[in-house]
Image (cartoon, grey):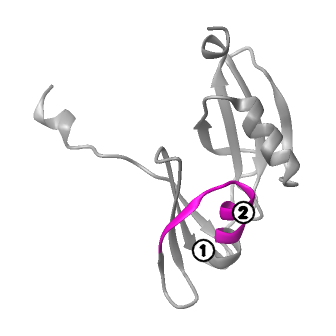
Amino acid sequence: MSEANTQFSHAAPIFPVSDVAKSIEYYKHMLGFEVMFTWGELPSYAVLKRDDAVSLHLSLRDENFKPASRHVTLYVFVYNVDDVYNDFVGKGVTILNPVGDREYGMRDFDIEDPDGFILSFGTGLDMLNN
């Protein structure tokens, strides 16, 4: 492996949100994320993590920010998409697209968070068939 290939550690999306504290509560209680770090007495930035595999940063957005409509912001690969789907449905998470097998080789579903970001959760069909 070349030195250039060893410089990368990990990446995380940063979601600009209207209320960091409210978003923390949503991601923590509804989606099962753990809060790793917050900045500010009324937080304006937060780092969240789920299962030591997915990191997500939240940042207080500018007042004129608008997320892209109907665009997946984050795709989370999971080991058993049906378990995740059932957990989220049971918690009242807003489901945009129910779980199902897709022509692109995934079984997945989409949710929408309180700020309009769309997250997809999926498992490869090849993983489910083994």
Q: Residue at x 40, y 48 (%)?
A: 11
The residue tagged with tag 2: helix, strand or loop? helix
Horizontally, residue 41 falls left or right of residue 20, namely: left
Mark 2 or mark 1, earlier in chain: 2
Residue 34 lies within the magenta run = yes
Question: In the rendered structure, which amino acid carries the disc numbered 2?
Answer: His
Q: Secondary structure at mark 1?
A: loop
Question: Which residue does the image show at 67% across and 8% down from the upper left?
Answer: 129
Where 97 falls versus 35 (above or below)? above
Query: How far apart are labels 2 and 1 at the CA level?
Result: 22 Å
From the viewer's perspective, tell me whether residue 71 is left or right of residue 130: right
Q: Which amino acid type is marked by label 1?
A: Arg
Q: Nearer the viewer, residue 74 or 123?
A: 123
The quadrant in which residue 100 appears is top right
Q: In the displayed orientation, state which residue is furthest to the bottom.
A: 41
Q: Residue furthest top?
A: 130
Q: For residue 42, what is the image quadrant?
A: bottom right
Q: Which mark is residue 61?
A: 1
* Residue 7: x %, y % from top left: 20, 43
Q: Which residue shows up at 74% across the image and 14% down it?
A: 103
Provide residue 14's location: percent of width, then percent of height. 52, 60
Which residue: 46% across, 52% down?
Answer: 12
Quadrant housing residue 75: top right
The quarter of the rendered structure image containing the N terminus is top left
Residue 29: mark in rendering: 2
**Residues in magenta, as a range:** 24-37
Residue 30 painted magenta: yes
Q: With respect to residue 115, does 49 lie above or below? A: above
Residue 28 in the image: state x and y as whole percent.
Answer: 66, 63
Could you say which is closer to the camera, residue 57 or residue 79? 79
Q: Circle 2: is it few (<14), some (14-19), or many (20+) Cα within 10 Å?
A: few
Disc 1 packing (10 Å; few <14; some 14–19; many ≥20): some
